Image: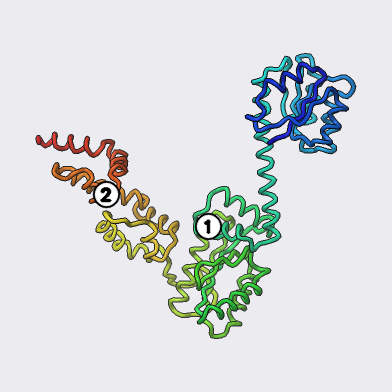
């Protein structure tokens, strides 16, 4: 709860504020009250309130002097001034002191409540930002943290949200000040888990000064990382792989990108290079674009798309998903989804729904087939959900559609 202190030389005003405002509903608690500025200073030092509600005019130390003095030992203190129409000069000075708000006297409780609520929200935002900055400072000290791993992993797979991406960008800028980046994917076919672990540790130690964030685990054989766009980083990768002798270690490096928004694309490029090397059992390091006739994912996808369409058309009444199809082509869901939309102009879900709805329309032409049977026949176990989707697609419920179709055929 936010701590509030009231300072006003009029007892009736202090009592009125205490009694008429539901402080608990505002997530606030009154920690003290003062009849003048000097008394308020003492209480601010003692209670460290979050918000000071003060009359701008008080005998002795007025509200402005009070706010000025309080800033020395309570710099985050928010101040709401109670002021009259004839206190314009005071108000001008209060603006310079960065007062949070002004409320005219005689004080309207509703107006004051709005002012307090606004200040409380500002405090929440300030504390949330401070918490994020504290996390960022912690991540800067520990680039192996689980938070950093999660942010990088999700960004590479294209499943991160805007806020997480911004946090990762801020972390990377604070940590490395990088302008351009690449992604490197390393695949190792070393026999035995213990031997592979030793290899990963060696790579990590050799590349520690050249990579940002941890080596992200993709699966037992693959790791990925962000490297700077410089020859030294790629050269270090080549030296490290050479040290492994005859061990099968494949490394793919993406093209250079200026922002983390394309981290998933960079990851896919590096992954394609690794697959190319692994298919030909060629240990070593290659940069995307340097390999002639690279069998990239888009080409594979185009060649095999007839199979995709045939599979969906024959199995749309089953519980098929984007994840299943992506796995069949060894692509991430995000990348498969983009390729699918590029090929057909609609998302996978839109394509699947269209197939199901067109088949449902045909089945509804037979009045002997019940609605729930149509639902099951096109892949929906819940007939109510099917009806919702059907109405969204056609503008009619299944019953309304059937009735209209039968009437149009004179049945």
Q: Is residue 246 left or right of residue 383?
A: right
Whole-percent x and y of residue 282? Answer: 48, 80
Residue hosting label 2: 356
344 up-or-down from 25: above or below: below
Compare residues 298 and 111 and report the one nearer the observer: 111
User: Which secondary structure lies at badge 2?
Assistant: helix
The colouring scheme, among rainbow, by chain, secondary structure or one colour, is: rainbow
Residue drawn 59% across the image and 81% down it: 242
291 up-or-down from 142: above or below: below
Q: CA distance from mark 1 to mark 2?
A: 32 Å
Residue drawn 17% across the image and 35% down it: 403
Could you tell which of marks 1 and 2 lies nearer the N-terminus?
A: 1
Q: Is residue 266 left or right of residue 87?
A: left
Q: Quadrant of residue 258?
A: bottom right
Compare residues 359 and 306 and report the one nearer the observer: 359
Instruction: Give the position of the C terminus as an image quadrant.
Output: top left
Residue drawn 58% across the image and 55% down it: 259
| Pointer 2 local density, CA inside 10 Å: few below 14, some 14–19, many at least 20 | many
Compare residues 159 and 7 and report the one nearer the observer: 7
Q: Find residue 154 and name its label.
A: 1
Whole-percent x and y of residue 237? Answer: 60, 74
| Pointer 1 local density, CA inside 10 Å: few below 14, some 14–19, many at least 20 | some
Q: How many marks?
A: 2
Whole-percent x and y of residue 124? Answer: 66, 38
Q: Is residue 87 left or right of residue 271?
A: right
């Amino acid at each position: 709860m936010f701590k509030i202190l009231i300072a006003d030389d009029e007892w009736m005003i202090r009592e009125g504020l205490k009694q008429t405002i539901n402080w608990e509903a505002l997530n606030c608690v009154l920690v003290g009250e003062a009849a003048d500025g000097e008394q308020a200073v003492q209480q601010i030092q003692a209670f460290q309130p979050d918000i000071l509600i003060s009359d701008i005019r008080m005998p002795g130390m007025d509200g402005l002097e009070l706010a000025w003095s309080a800033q020395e030992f309570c710099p985050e203190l928010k101040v709401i001034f109670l002021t009259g129409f004839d206190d314009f000069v005071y108000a001008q000075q209060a603006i310079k002191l960065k007062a949070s708000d002004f409320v005219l006297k005689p004080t309207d409780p509703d107006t004051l409540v709005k002012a307090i609520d606004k200040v409380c929200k500002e405090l929440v935002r300030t504390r949330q930002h401070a918490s994020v900055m504290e996390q960022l400072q912690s991540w800067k000290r520990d680039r192996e943290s689980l938070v950093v791993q999660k942010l990088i992993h999700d960004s590479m797979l294209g499943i991160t949200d805007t806020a997480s991406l911004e946090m990762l960008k801020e972390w990377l800028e604070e940590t490395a000040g990088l302008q351009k980046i690449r992604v490197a994917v390393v695949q190792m076919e070393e026999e035995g888990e213990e031997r592979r672990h030793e290899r990963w540790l060696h790579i990590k130690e050799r590349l520690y000064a050249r990579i940002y964030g941890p080596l992200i685990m993709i699966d037992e054989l693959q790791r990925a990382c962000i490297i700077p766009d410089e020859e030294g980083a790629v050269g270090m990768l080549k030296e490290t792989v050479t040290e492994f002798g005859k061990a099968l270690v494949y490394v793919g490096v993406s093209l250079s990108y200026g922002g983390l928004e394309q981290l998933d694309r960079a990851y896919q490029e590096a992954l394609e290079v690794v697959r190319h090397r692994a298919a030909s059992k060629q240990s070593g390091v290659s940069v995307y674009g340097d390999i002639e006739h690279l069998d990239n994912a888009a080409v594979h996808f185009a060649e095999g798309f007839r199979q995709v369409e045939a599979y969906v058309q024959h199995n749309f009444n089953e519980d098929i998903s984007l994840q299943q199809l992506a796995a069949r082509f060894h692509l991430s869901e995000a990348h498969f989804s983009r390729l699918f939309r590029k090929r057909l102009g609609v998302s996978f879900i839109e394509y699947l729904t269209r197939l199901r709805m067109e088949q449902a329309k045909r089945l509804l032409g037979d009045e002997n087939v019940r609605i729930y049977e149509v639902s099951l026949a096109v892949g929906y176990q819940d007939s109510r959900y099917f009806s919702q989707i059907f109405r969204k697609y056609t503008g009619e419920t299944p019953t309304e559609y059937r009735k209209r179709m039968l009437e149009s055929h004179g049945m």
